[in-house]
Amino acid sequence: MRIFALALLLVTAACTTPEQGAQSTDPFLSGPLTFRKVEGDPVPTNQQPTGYPAPHHSADDPAVAQAKALRQLAEGPARAQLLATFDCSAPDPLLGNDDRTLPLVTCDAGDHRYALGPVFLDGDRVMKATAEPDATGAGHVVTVKFDQQGAQVFGDFTAANIGSQVAILMNGRVLSAPTIQSAIPGGVVQITGRFTKAQAEQLAAHLNGG
């Protein structure tokens, strides 16, 4: 099978997910999948990766509104300061509660911070997801195939943003942030992250609606 996303995935700096062990389930791998443009360079936290926490705040929690005001409405120097100081290991009210229409400051597994644009594509456009071993031998990956509309949106986005990074997120945390090296019109992309076999299968099952 030809994977059209190979060019996209050749560069995946600042998006490595630590091994999580042989867990059969992972609460993090259940939630909204979204795609956002990375604005600027990811900022190292100089901290040890902490992994991916599961959401614990309801949408009406006052902490969610406070976090949105801080991390989704900040601009200019305030946003730059947040990128330099945000604690990725602290409890995160925006997990699964971020506003898809607004920019977002967030983290990956804890070793990099990201400034992201609004969501341009979400998991509703996924037709099929499959788990398979990573060809590089680094754990497993999830290959995602979009429907016709999703493929069009993704193809247009990659054509207009060659050289930029695209962030693939679950619950508002970055799973992978590969650099776009060419337009990808095929509607097939791989989510990398050093997943265990069980984690990749669980994520694929979730994306397939099961």
Image (cartoon, rainbow, N blue to C red):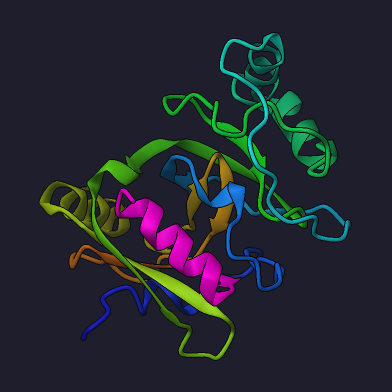
- The spot of residue 99 in percent (x, y) is 49, 24
Q: Nearer the viewer, residue 53 or 152?
A: 53
Q: Identify the residue at horizontal 45%, vertical 44% (top origin).
A: 36
Q: Is residue 14 above or below residue 52?
A: below
Q: Quadrant of residue 94?
A: top right
Q: Is residue 200 above or below residue 121?
A: below
Q: Is residue 138 above or below residue 161?
A: below
Q: Is residue 1 magenta?
A: no
Q: Residue furthest front?
A: 24
Report the side of 181 relative to 193 (left or right).
Answer: left
- The spot of residue 164 in percent (x, y) is 46, 58
Q: Is residue 11 visible?
A: no
Q: Nearer the viewer, residue 166 or 55?
A: 55
The image shows a total of numbered marks equal to 0
Report the side of 84 relative to 66 (left or right).
Answer: right
Region rendered in magenta: 192-210
Q: Is residue 54 above or below residue 46?
A: above
Q: Identify the residue at horizontal 76%, vertical 53% (top origin).
A: 110
Q: Which image quarter is the N terminus in?
A: bottom left
Q: Identify the residue at horizontal 71%, vertical 72% (top origin).
A: 21
Q: Quadrant of residue 7?
A: bottom left
Q: Is residue 7 visible?
A: yes
Report the side of 72 relative to 66 (left or right).
Answer: left
Q: Residue furthest left?
A: 148
Report the side of 136 relative to 124 (left or right).
Answer: right
Q: Nearer the viewer, residue 19 or 74?
A: 19
Q: Identify the residue at horizontal 58%, vertical 74% (top origin).
A: 196
Q: Nearer the viewer, residue 9 or 147?
A: 147
- The spot of residue 112 in percent (x, y) is 73, 54
